[in-house]
Image (cartoon, rainbow, N blue to C red):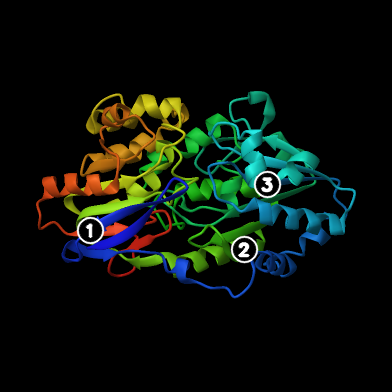
């Protein structure tokens, strides 16, 4: 019997599976990478040697109003480490700069003060000017024309009115934007509801290029890059994270060049051959990405890449924050996967419903695979309404899956489905 720790909420959940049934355990090699330096050293070295730009302290020297865009409570950006270093770097070049920290929420709920203290530390919350983006407050946004897709570009006015725009974040594979990080701090991060919705429209998410690990030809990525250029995102600090969400690499400088360098690092250490199974078990990497069901398709899409025809997917997702969105909840429970997909496919891009991309992804996968959702926080009746099968432990879920697929079913385990980039033979992303 093999015991495998599956990330769940703020800890792990044990999976017990017979060695004879185990086809493969897929993990990102990034979890084995040892930079040989402290997290602070990695960040400071990246800022001291930016890619494609002068140092941030030099860029800040003659700027009065500076905005730093950072991630919200749903992302594991280690801002307690990165933000103090970024602030020091800026103030070493311009001690009198007026700095605003703008929290990029996308369409998520507002980040609470308690969450800010957990993310940034008391020192920053008590002494820095922090603004939380609210995508649903039209007066906070200005129009910046149209994006390549034709979508209207409405962005938080603070990013347009400042003299220097900086962003921090982290890079990992993303199931329809290709990779997170870089330009994604702007779109969807600090854009108005209508811009985010159109970027995440049924048509855009349905593109064959809108998938994990793909940037070239990806219409979602192309609009994101155009948006970041339009507001003159001059400098980014992006990090790569290890298994304990610790910084293992840092990339700073030009929004595109630094991000591309980080992407190649992530691709090198996250990529692994896709192995097909009858039962595929995964998680969203634990907290904070597994705090609601709305975020969970990220790992489910990775599991899909490793599914044989008719395979069962087991998704471990704490959902301590519930479903994660009222629009998502309404859409995912409105009918069968076929009915959901048919309904969403008829919605014009300009009329995209907030959060519809999540039920779209789920409907696509649920048409082909049953999903057993392991959660101890989300009401199991709600799980059933969302077209999934509830379970309270991953062992319980595995027993259910064996009942469906037979005792000779082959099991593939992807402990952290967000960190893995599964590729088929020939090197193409699944």
From mark 2 to mark 1, how far is it between C-alphas? 41 Å
* Left or right relative to 130: residue 331: left
Q: Identify which residue, 44 or 396, lies in the foreground.
A: 396
Q: Classify mark 1: helix, strand or loop.
A: strand
Instruction: Kindly identify which residue carries mark 1.
Output: 17
For the point 55% across and 50% down, the residue is: 76
Quadrant of the frame with the N terminus: bottom left
For the point 51% across and 68% down, the residue is: 265
Q: Of the numbered discs in the image, which one, if any, rests on residue 258?
A: 2
Q: Residues within 10 Å of mark 3 (few under 14, many from 20)?
A: some
Quadrant of the frame with the C terminus: bottom left
Image quadrant in which you'd find residue 103: top right
Instruction: Kindly identify which residue carries mark 3.
Output: 120
Q: Position of residue 290 (x, y in %)?
A: 43, 43
Instruction: Pick out the residue farthest to the bottom.
Output: 36
Q: Position of residue 405 (x, y in %)?
A: 12, 49
Q: Position of residue 184 (x, y in %)?
A: 56, 48
Q: Position of residue 115 (x, y in %)?
A: 61, 39
* Left or right relative to 164: residue 397: left
User: Viewer-nearest of labels 1 and 3?
Assistant: 1
Q: Are marks 2 and 1 in contact (CB under 8 Å)?
A: no
* Left or right relative to 139: residue 239: left
Above or below — where is 362 with respect to 246? above
Q: Could one spot residue 278 in this view of the protein?
A: yes
* Left or right relative to 416: residue 380: left
Q: Classify mark 3: helix, strand or loop.
A: helix
Above or below — where is 53 with respect to 152? below
For the point 61% across and 58% down, the residue is: 238
From mark 3 to mark 2, how far is it between C-alphas? 24 Å
């Amino acid at each position: 019997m093999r015991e495998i720790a599956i990330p769940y909420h703020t800890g792990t959940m044990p999976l017990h599976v017979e060695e004879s049934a185990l086809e493969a355990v897929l993990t990102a090699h990034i979890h084995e990478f040892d930079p040989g330096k402290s997290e602070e050293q990695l960040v400071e070295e990246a800022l001291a040697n930016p890619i494609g730009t002068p140092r941030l302290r030099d860029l800040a020297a003659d700027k009065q109003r500076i905005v730093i865009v950072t991630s919200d409570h749903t992302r594991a950006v280690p801002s307690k480490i990165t933000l103090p270093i970024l602030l020091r770097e800026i103030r070493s070049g311009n001690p009198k700069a007026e700095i605003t920290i703008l929290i990029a929420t996308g369409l998520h709920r507002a980040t609470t003060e308690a969450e800010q203290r957990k993310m940034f530390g008391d020192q920053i919350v008590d002494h820095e000017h922090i603004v939380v983006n609210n995508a649903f407050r039209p007066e906070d946004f200005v129009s910046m024309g149209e994006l390549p897709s034709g979508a209207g570009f409405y962005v938080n006015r603070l990013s347009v009115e400042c003299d220097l725009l900086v962003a921090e974040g982290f890079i990992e594979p993303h199931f329809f934007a290709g990779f997170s990080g870089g330009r994604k701090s702007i779109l969807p991060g600090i854009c108005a509801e209508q811009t985010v919705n159109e970027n995440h429209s049924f048509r855009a998410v349905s593109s064959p290029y809108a998938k994990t690990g793909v940037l070239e030809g990806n219409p979602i990525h192309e609009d994101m890059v155009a948006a970041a250029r339009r507001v003159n995102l001059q400098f980014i600090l992006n990090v790569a994270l290890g298994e304990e969400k610790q910084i293992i690499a840092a990339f700073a400088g030009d929004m595109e060049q630094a991000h591309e360098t980080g992407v190649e690092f992530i691709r090198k250490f996250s990529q692994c051959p896709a192995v097909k199974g009858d039962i595929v078990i995964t998680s969203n990497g634990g907290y904070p990405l597994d705090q609601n069901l709305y975020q969970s398709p990220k790992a489910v899409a990775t599991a899909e890449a490793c599914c044989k025809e008719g395979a069962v997917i087991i998704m471990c997702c704490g959902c301590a924050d519930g479903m994660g969105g009222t629009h998502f909840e309404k859409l995912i429970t409105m009918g069968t996967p076929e009915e959901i997909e048919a309904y969403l496919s008829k919605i014009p891009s300009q009329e995209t419903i907030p959060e519809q991309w999540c039920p779209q992804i789920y409907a696509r996968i649920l048409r082909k695979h049953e999903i057993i959702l392991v959660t101890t926080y989300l009401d199991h009746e709600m799980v059933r309404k969302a077209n999934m099968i509830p379970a309270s432990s991953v062992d319980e879920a595995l027993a259910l899956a064996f009942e469906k697929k037979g005792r000779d079913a082959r099991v593939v385990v992807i402990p952290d489905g967000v960190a893995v980039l599964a590729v088929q033979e020939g090197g193409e992303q699944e």
